[in-house]
Image (cartoon, rainbow, N blue to C red):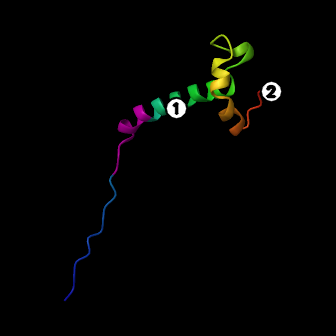
Amino acid sequence: MTHAVAIPTPVSIPVRQILPYAVFAGIISLIALYFVGAEQGALAVFEGTTVHELVHDARHLLGFPCH
């Protein structure tokens, strides 16, 4: 007695469906990189050190110097 083995076929997802999510993820990543890496000093968008203190540990974890 033989059994037929079902072979799964890969599902293709068109780039047109993935592109908006990829662009959104890229923009969010760039914003996060800015706040962790450059939000202090002359490039600061927000006044004071609130954002710097908020992302201070992430800054060191990712290798950005800050002091």
In-front residue for pair 65/2: 65
65 relative to 25 in the view: left or right: right
Task: Tell me the mark number nearer the camera, choosing from 2 and 1.
Answer: 2
Q: Is residue 2 above or below residue 11?
A: below
Specify the quadrant of the image occupied by residue 43.
top right
Instruction: Give the residues in magenta.
Output: 12-21
Quick check: is 16 in the magenta stretch?
yes
Residue type indicated by callout 2: His
The residue at which mark 1 appears reads as 26
In the rendering, which numbered label is found on residue 35? none
Specify the quadrant of the image occupied by residue 39.
top right
Q: Is residue 9 above or below residue 67?
A: below
The residue at which mark 2 appears reads as 67
Dominant secondary structure of the magenta stretch? helix
Q: Residue at image x 26%, y 75%? A: 5
Q: Residue at image x 68%, y 29%? A: 56
Pointer 2 or 1: first along the chain: 1
Residue that extends furthest to the right in the rendered view of this protein: 67
Mark 2 vs mark 1, CA separation in Å:
28 Å
Cβ atoms at labels 2 and 1 below 8 Å apart: no
- The residue carrying pointer 1 sits among few (fewer than 14), some (14 to 19) or many (20 or more) residues within 10 Å by Cα, namely few
Residue type indicated by callout 1: Gly
Q: Residue at image x 62%, y 25%? A: 54
